[in-house]
Image: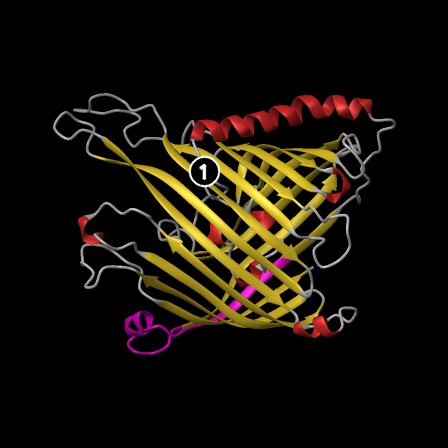
């Protein structure tokens, strides 16, 4: 999928939202204001205990099993109206600062913004019953990560694209959501900085995202009411490291380096069975050389792929769906290929990849608290044997977790 085509699709969507929907909103008779509470405060805490069982981390700890208690995240949400049909959302992210570049200044838990956005809703029912349009501006959820967290239990781990750093889960920009009539799904488009919520803007390029979450059985109660087919696109660019030129260089490189991702997510969200399948692909351009006559700049592309499947099952509810069960089982398998066609001679005849596995069980003592006992493992596969020391590879990692969350 070309970068130009992806951008054209997203720009067309944004144009439709910004230009067509307002006229539909004016034609609506009469307009209905969105009623919101004067102030809404909520939050969630993610915590865990980790017991490392792989040989590499045991060796680094002198043969013992390293282990620790941790608070992974605390999200605090503030929502309030700012006039008819408009509202703001501010979400703070309390996190453990383990960044070596900054923890000399502060070691421990720090706070930063995750979301800070204004949302305006209009054109209600203009496209059919249940339809509307939301315009967003500010720091907002990414088009696919936040959406998939509605299926996968985020408190046990990141979604596949978030875990592999395909893009940030939040970014600053402008976006539009069109909710389709008759519970048929929604369409979401964004123009964002691309640097994510953990960094200021790093270059002059903007990234474009698009998601179409289609729920063909949304109006039909039953197991498949929440069945969703969700294609998505993320088209972006990074600045060249030679953008400013320099002494001895042949000149500045003003063109961006493509950073494109696309995929499809198929999911089902029911108390008896929540499941999802991911097919994701990433295309990145990198540079070699010094941008000089003696060492010309060379640009080349790499293509990675990630496949994933997960399921959350409540066996007791299959016997009696009317009675809510407090326990269930979790399983997940990701297969990530960093580069489908590695160019280094050391990889000849091989295609290195990683498998990530999660197996566990959970219990919910209350509707707003959850605990799980789960095992997570990442295993490299397909690497040449013996593996050259000059080429780095993440060793096998195996961890037993006790995860917990509390929402309020």
* Image coordinates for residue 4, horizontal then vertical, percent: 45, 27
Q: Residue at x 57, y 56 (%)?
A: 276
Q: Name the element at disc 1.
A: loop
Position of residue 401 in the picture relative to residue 122 (left or right): left
Q: What residue is pinned by disc 1?
A: 195
Quarter of the rendering occupied by the N terminus: top left
Vertical arrangement, residue 61 with respect to residue 76, above or below: below
**Residue 58, image x, y percentages:** 32, 74
Tell me where residue 341 appears, x and y as whole percent.
Answer: 29, 46
Q: Quadrant of the C terminus?
A: bottom right
Residue at screen point 63% across, 71% down: 328
Query: Is the residue marked by circle 1 packed among few (<14), some (14-19), or many (20+) residues within 10 Å?
Result: many
Specify whether residue 150 is painted magenta. Answer: no
* Magenta-drawn segment: 44-66
Q: Nearer the viewer, residue 166 or 201?
A: 166
Q: Residue at x 39, y 52 (%)?
A: 99
Is 241 placed above or below 321 here?
A: above
């Amino acid at each position: 999928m070309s970068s130009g085509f992806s951008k054209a699709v997203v720009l067309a969507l944004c144009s439709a939202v910004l230009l067509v929907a307002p006229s539909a909103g004016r034609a609506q008779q009469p307009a209905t204001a969105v009623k919101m509470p004067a102030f809404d405060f909520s939050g969630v805490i993610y915590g865990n205990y980790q017991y490392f069982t792989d040989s590499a981390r045991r060796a680094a700890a002198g043969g013992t099993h390293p282990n620790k208690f941790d608070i992974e995240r605390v999200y605090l949400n503030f929502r309030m109206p700012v006039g008819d049909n408009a509202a703001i959302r501010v979400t703070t992210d309390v996190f453990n600062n383990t960044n070596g570049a900054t923890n000399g200044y502060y070691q421990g838990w720090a706070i930063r913004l995750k979301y800070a956005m204004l949302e305006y809703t209009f054109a209600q029912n203009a496209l059919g019953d249940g339809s509307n349009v939301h315009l967003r501006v500010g720091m907002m959820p990414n088009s696919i990560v936040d959406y998939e967290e509605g299926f996968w239990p985020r408190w046990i781990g990141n979604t596949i694209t978030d875990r592999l750093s395909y893009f940030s889960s939040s970014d600053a920009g402008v976006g539009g959501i069109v909710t389709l009539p008759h519970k048929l799904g929604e369409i979401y488009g964004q123009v964002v900085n691309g640097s994510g919520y953990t960094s200021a803007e790093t270059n002059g390029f903007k990234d474009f995202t698009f998601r179409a979450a289609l729920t063909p059985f949304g109006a039909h109660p039953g197991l498949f009411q929440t069945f969703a087919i969700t294609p998505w696109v993320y088209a972006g660019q990074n600045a060249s490291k030679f953008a400013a030129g320099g002494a001895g260089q042949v000149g500045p490189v003003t063109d961006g380096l493509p950073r494109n991702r696309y995929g499809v997510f198929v999911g089902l969200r029911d108390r008896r069975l929540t499941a999802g399948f991911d097919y994701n692909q990433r295309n990145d351009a990198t540079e070699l050389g010094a941008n000089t006559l003696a060492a010309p700049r060379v640009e080349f592309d790499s293509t990675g792929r990630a496949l994933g499947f997960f399921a959350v099952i409540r066996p007791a509810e299959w016997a009696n769906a009317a009675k809510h069960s407090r326990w269930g089982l979790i399983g997940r398998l990701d297969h990530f290929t960093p580069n489908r066609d590695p160019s280094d001679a050391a990889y000849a005849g091989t295609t290195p990849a990683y498998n990530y596995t999660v197996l566990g069980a959970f219990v919910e003592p209350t509707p707003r608290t959850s605990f799980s006992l789960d095992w997570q493992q990442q295993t490299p596969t397909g690497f040449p044997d013996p593996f050259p020391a000059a080429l780095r590879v993440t060793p096998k990692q195996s961890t037993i977790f006790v995860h917990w969350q509390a929402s309020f």
